[in-house]
Amino acid sequence: MFFIPGVEVTARVNGRAKIIADEAKLADFAVSGNRPRAAIVVDAREAYLHCAKALKRSKLWEDDYRIERGELPTLGKMVSDQVNGEISVEDAEPGVWTSYRDRMW
């Protein structure tokens, strides 16, 4: 399912997907000289628009319905929780921001 911020109608694609790591094929997906490590290739069997009822009910794109970011744990906290504390929040947090800064593409 594909979402576009602010648009309530979604595009839905059904089919089979596979992960590829072939360097020659991934070269086409490079951004700013950075080639992805893997990509998802979808063999689409059906593609259609999906009505907006669920998104309208959820108020997903409405600004006055959004929660404050501080109400959710940080990504570093969630990572730490997923690995049962094997990585501390203090170690995970800087890695998240480093990844955003240095490995966006």
Image: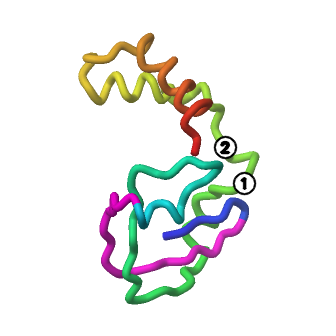
Residue ID at (56%, 25%):
97
Q: Amino acid at mark 1?
A: Glu
Instruction: List x then y, in percent, for residue 37.
Output: 40, 50
* Prevailing SS of the magenta stretch: strand
Residue ID at (56%, 56%):
30
* Residue range (magenta): 7-23
| Crowdedness near tag 1: few (<14), some (14–19) or many (≥20) residues, C-alpha within 10 Å | few
Instruction: List x then y, in percent, for residue 54.
Output: 54, 68
Q: Is residue 96 left or right of residue 101?
A: left
For label 1, the SS is: loop
Q: Amino acid at mark 2?
A: Arg
For label 2, the SS is: loop
Instruction: List x then y, in percent, for residue 63.
Output: 75, 48
Q: Are marks 2 and 1 in contact (CB under 8 Å)?
A: yes
Instruction: List x then y, in percent, for residue 44.
Output: 41, 83
Q: Quadrant of residue 2?
A: bottom right
Q: Nearer the viewer, residue 54 or 33?
A: 33
Location of mark 1 (residue): 62
Residue 94, magenta (yes or no): no
Location of mark 2 (residue): 66
Q: Nearer the viewer, residue 10 or 57?
A: 10
Q: In the rendered view, would you say 105 is above or below 75?
A: below
Residue 71 marker: none
Q: Is residue 33 left or right of residue 39?
A: right
Q: Is residue 61 left or right of residue 17?
A: right
Residue 8, magenta (yes or no): yes
| Crowdedness near tag 2: few (<14), some (14–19) or many (≥20) residues, C-alpha within 10 Å | few
